[in-house]
Amino acid sequence: MSITRISSGGEFEAKIGYCRAVVAGGFVHVAGTVGQGDDVVAQCKSALDTIGAALEKAGASFADVVRVNYYLPDAAEFEPCWPVLADRFGANPPAATMIECNLISPQFRIEIEVTALAPSN
């Protein structure tokens, strides 16, 4: 089985020892991704942009996502993100889980990770 690692060039990938995504076993596994911005909605959009770029490098798209996990330090902040998520996933909603937990830094309001089907060759 071949494994392809996709880097986004983020500073923490080398510091921590991870990559943005790994294509293996017929799937694209995208690492938990936080975004930039002043509020949860801006951070959600930013994280999805980063995830979308990783999926594109793997030859996939949001239409290929089969599983998504959302992590938020405050579950009450999830609902404002719903329109953004519904728009991004459109007619292809994945299975989803939302977990309330601490994130790596208090400035981050949402972290998103996805698993998508990898393109078949």
Image (cartoon, grey):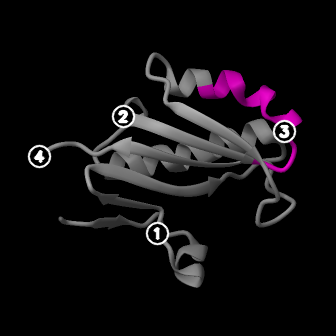
User: Looking at the image, do the residues carrying marks 3 and 1 touch, with CB atoms under 8 Å apart?
Assistant: no
Range of residues picked out in magenta: 72-85
Name the residue type under label 2.
Answer: Asp
Residue where numbered disc 3 is placed = 75
Name the secondary structure under disc 3: helix
Q: For the residue carrying disc 1, how many other residues have a C-alpha within 10 Å: few (<14), some (14-19), or many (20+)? A: some
Q: In which quarter of the image is the N terminus?
A: bottom left
Front residue (pair 12, 69)? 69
Q: Name the residue under label 1.
A: 19
Are the residues tagged 4 and 2 within 8 Å (C-beta)? no
Instruction: Kindly report the secondary structure that dominates the magenta region of the rendered protein.
Output: helix
**Label 3 sits on what residue type?**
Ala
Report the residue marked by disc 2.
64
Mark 4 highlights which residue? 121
- The 10 Å Cα crowd at callout 2, few under 14, some 14 to 19, many 20 or more, is many
Above or below, comparing residue 71 to residue 8 in the picture: above
Q: Which of marks 4 and 2 is nearer the N terminus?
A: 2
Rendered location of residue 45, percent (x, y): 65, 38
Tell me which label, 3 or 1, sits earlier in the chain. Answer: 1
